[in-house]
Each structure stands twice: as structure tokens, then as C-alpha cells.
Image (tube, grey):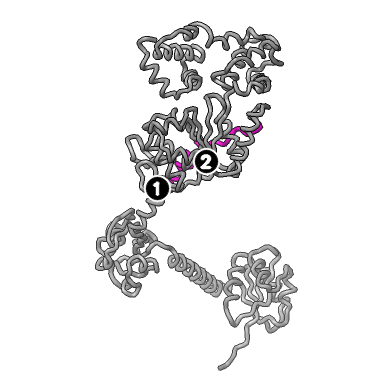
Amino acid sequence: MILLSKIKVAVVGAGGEGSSVYRVLREIDNIQIIGVADINLASPGMILARKDKVFVTDSLEELVTKPEIDVIIEATGSSEVQRKIHKLKHQGTAVMEALAGNLLMSILQAKEELLEVKKLKSELWAILNSVQEAIEVADNSGLIKYTNPAFTRVTGIPEAQRVGKNIFEASPHGALAQALVKQKPVVGYRSKVGGSGVEVISNAAPILVEGEVEGAVVVFQPITDILKLMDELQKSTTIIENLYAKIDQITGSKYTFDDLTGSSKVFAATIDMAKKAAKSDSPVLLTGESGTGKELYAHAIHQASQRRGKPFIKIGCASVPEELLESELFGHEKGAFTGAVKTKLGKVELANGGTLFLDEIGEMNPYLQGKLMRLLQDQEFERVGGSETIRSDVRVITATNIDLKSLVRKGRFREELYFLLNVIELNLPPLRQRREDIPVLVEHFIGKLNRKLGKKVRGVAPDALQLLSGYDWPGNIRELENVIERAMVSVETEVIGRQHFSPYIGQFTNAETTQCTEIVPLDKMEQMMLKAALARYGESLEGKKKAAQALNISLATLYNKLKKYKASM
């Protein structure tokens, strides 16, 4: 075998044609490029040569005088450059001028284009072989020219058994055959792949070359994959909707133990017990009269616990209609009942990882008490209308102003649930049992209400404070704050006097309530108390809520009693 020595070539001119010549020459094994010259060091050919570590120069003389060059290819087309090359080159060096070498350069450029086509074809083949959708290509006569690996995966038909067949015989009713017959795209076509029976959704289109149909290509997926994608999309949509709902519904705890005010021994003992409760994950039962601050304690316990960074979700069991309470607590699936147009997360699910505060727990019906027992025991539940068991890690705090033990004896509250909730019981004392805290609370509320009302009240007169301290406060701290706010709205001085409080504090010892010293029927007494409470707090929804709290009954019970005595009141 005779080994041929390499032809050593220099290229003068590295613009468009020169760079094309350079790209082709470097692919030829028996050609060695000695150097490239161009007055523009940033021309395409110069950049390529530098990357290949080939000698480059902007001096024509420096390149063409090299003794080892066999051929100089002149690619500028300049007669002046050609004249200089002939003058400077060595005697044995051949020169291929642009005019004389047009044919060779055309051949070289054509070869470069073929190399580029080959590269593009390799890239396209790699893409087609890697996509997950099945692809099949046929020429204009229907002869199948190509199938990708996904085609075999989807249909089970090997490439060797498909390529070379005619599509009009193999799958005459498919999208590929339809695109060839109609000579236009076929989109979303549902059919079975001939030879496999696999049901697919296809998109096919004719292949046009200079306006003529040269064949067609089809891309398809099994219908099962489409259905799975639709199912995943639906699940994702539901998750997104629920996340928006979660953002709207989740509230954090607003109060800490610093927001609870008092200096009495009974108050200090209550705070100490509450802080101990915050260190555990056990259920807490907050008991006490209306207005003693049970919700504030629930907030503070959560904020001092290890769950402080998680949701604090609250719900009043008496403030939600009984028929909707289950859905509010445990959520519901789409279509669970009329109006359930989408899946909804309940408070239990939203509180996952955090604290669930159930106020007025005594108003919960026995059925929901059973679901709550399961949550406490197993941390599991199902949405309304659903069968999927969902886990939720929640710490439950409940509150009531009703004696739950009496409800247990009457069969209205499950004994097992009572014991589950009452792991830690925190009884909040009424204000009349902590009268020494009244001056501190008064000062606290005046500071708070000064900011709210834009006032500059400094305090209360001694006789006014004596009046406040001597009152029994059936509405407890909530009533005290309400009385102070009503007085501050009307006061024009920096000190609140006795006269500013007495109209509100004396309401329950005046008018119709004085008749309570006489023996009257209990229903008459009940009517008088209802009228007195509404007179104090008003008949708005907020007023009725306060009236119900002062009377130590739920809002639902208040409405029932008002309905009962409507005619006589």
C-alpha cells in the first residue's frame, strides 16, 4: 500500500467563500492547511482557523512566502491580490485563482452543504429516536419508510415488520393514510393502529417539497396515555384550586401570652397552666363563662407551642348551620351534594401540622362527635362524599361555656369524646373572681382604645374605678371592654368619670329586671332577660352574638328563643 504525502495548502481570503473552502479542506484527510491570511482578523475563516490552532495572519507576504506550501488557494477574487501572490510565492508553489477555481470551489461548497445536511439528518434522527410519541413516515405512494423506537413500544410491532409495508394495507383507516389521501393535516384523529389494535390519538400531516406532496408523517399516543394526562391535569387543577382556597382560609395565631393581662394569683395560676399545656401536643379543653378570653388563650397556647409556624384554624361550632358543619370541618368531594361544584378542603385538612380550635364544642351533634373521635384517635378522616382516607396531624383545642359533664349525663355528648378532649382542662375564672385585675385591664383597654378611637384618655376617676370593681360583670372581660369603649366614644375629657359608666353598668339592675325580685314564671323571666340583653347589645348580628354570650347560650339557641317568644315580645 502506497502512502501519499499530505498536500500543504494556504488559503488567502477568509470571508464567505474562503471560510467555506476552509471548512471543506479541513475535512479531507490528505490535505494539511498551513495557514490562512486575511486583512480582517475577525472574518469567519480566521475565527475558525484560530479555533483549530492553524496559523493566521493579516500579512499576505508572511503566508505565501512559506517554502513548504504546495498550493495557494486565492479566495478574494481580487486581481491585485492575485498579482502579489504570483510575485511573492516560491517557484514550485501552485496557485488556484478564484476565476480559474470557481468549479472546484463550487464542488467544495456542495460537499460542505452535503456535510451540513448529513449533520442535520443525524441530529433529526437522534431527536426522532428519543421522543416518547410514536412516529411513522410514508412516501407519497404509501410505502412506510421509517418508524421510531416509540412506535414499537406503543404498538408492539417491530420496525422490521413495518418498514417496507404499504400504509394503505397495514393501516388503511389511520391518520397517516388519511393525510396522504386528503393531502392535508389530520388532527386529533382517534383510531386503532392496524396490526396491533391499540387505540390511539393521532396527528398527521403531508410532507411538502416545493409544493408537491412527497409523503406524510404521523405522531400518535395511546388513548390510555391521554386519559392519564387528563386525569393528572384534573388532579393538578384541584390541587391548585385547593391551594388558593387554603391561602384564603388559613389564619395564623394573632395573640401571645403577652396579650393576656392580669396580676391576680388566680390569673397567674391560669397562665402557668396554659404555658405548661403549650409544651405538649395533648388536646386542651378551655372552659369558662362567655367573655373570659378562651379564644385568646387558644391563640397563645398555639403561639407558644412547637406548632407556632404552622396554621391556626378556628371554627365556631354554633356559628355554622348544623347541616354545613361537617363540610366545613372535614371538606367535601365534587358532587357530594347539590352545590358541591368542586372539591373543598375542610378546616381539619387546612390545619394539618398546626392547631385546630373548636369553639362552642358542646353544640356539635353526636354524628360529628364520632368523626372527631376518630380524628383524635387515628388522625384520619374522609371528606363528605369521599372514600379516600386522609391523614391530618392536628393539635385540637376546644372551648365551651357549657358544663360538658351535664351534657354527657343527658346523653347529648359522647363520654369517650369528653375524655379525649379533656386531657388538659383549663378553667378560666370569671372576672368577678379576679377583681384585683380590673384596674390593670381598664388601663390596658384605655391604651388600646386610644389608638383605635384617636382619643387621649389618661384613666378613670377613683369613684368610677370603684363602680367598675364592684360590678359582677356577667359578660366578663368582653363586657368590660365594651363598657369602656362605649364610655370613651362619648367622653370629652382626659379622665372618665362614674357618670360615663353608670348608664351601662346599671342596665341589669334597672327597668324590667327589677321585677326579678318578685316571683314570676320562668318563661316570663327568660323573656325579660332576652329583652334586656338585646337592649344592651342591639339587634344586629354582632349584637345578638354578644347577647348570646352574656346569656351563656349559643347563638342558635338565642334565635330559637326569639322565635318562640316572637308574639309576646
Q: Residue furthest bottom?
A: 1
| Along the viewing direction, whichever of 8 and 174 lies nearer the viewer | 174
Three-letter residue code for mark 1: Gln
Among the 4 quarters of the image, the one containing residue 307: top right
Q: In the rendered image, is residue 273 in sight?
A: yes
Q: Residue furthest front?
A: 519
Question: Quarter holding the N terminus?
Answer: bottom right
SS class, disc 1: helix
| Along the viewing direction, whichever of 371 and 309 lies nearer the viewer | 371
Q: Is residue 235 magenta?
A: yes
Residue 265 position, x and y percent, is 66, 29
Three-letter residue code for mark 2: Val
**Dot 2, crowdedness within 10 Å: few (<14), some or many (≥20)?**
few
Q: Which mark is residue 549?
A: none
Q: In the rendered image, is residue 441 in sight?
A: no
Q: Is residue 488 magenta?
A: no
Image-based side of 221 in relation to 375, left or right:
left
Asked if disc 1 and disc 2 are in contact, CB closer than 8 Å, the reply is: no
Among the 4 quarters of the image, the one containing residue 293: top right
Residue at the image position 60 percent from the left and 15 percent from the top: 471
Q: Is residue 195 above or below residue 263?
A: below
Residue at the image position 68 percent from the left and 84 percent from the top: 92
Q: Which mark is residue 423?
A: 2
Query: What segment is highlighted magenta in the picture?
Result: 234-259
Residue 82 position, x and y percent, is 67, 72
Q: Which mark is residue 234?
A: 1
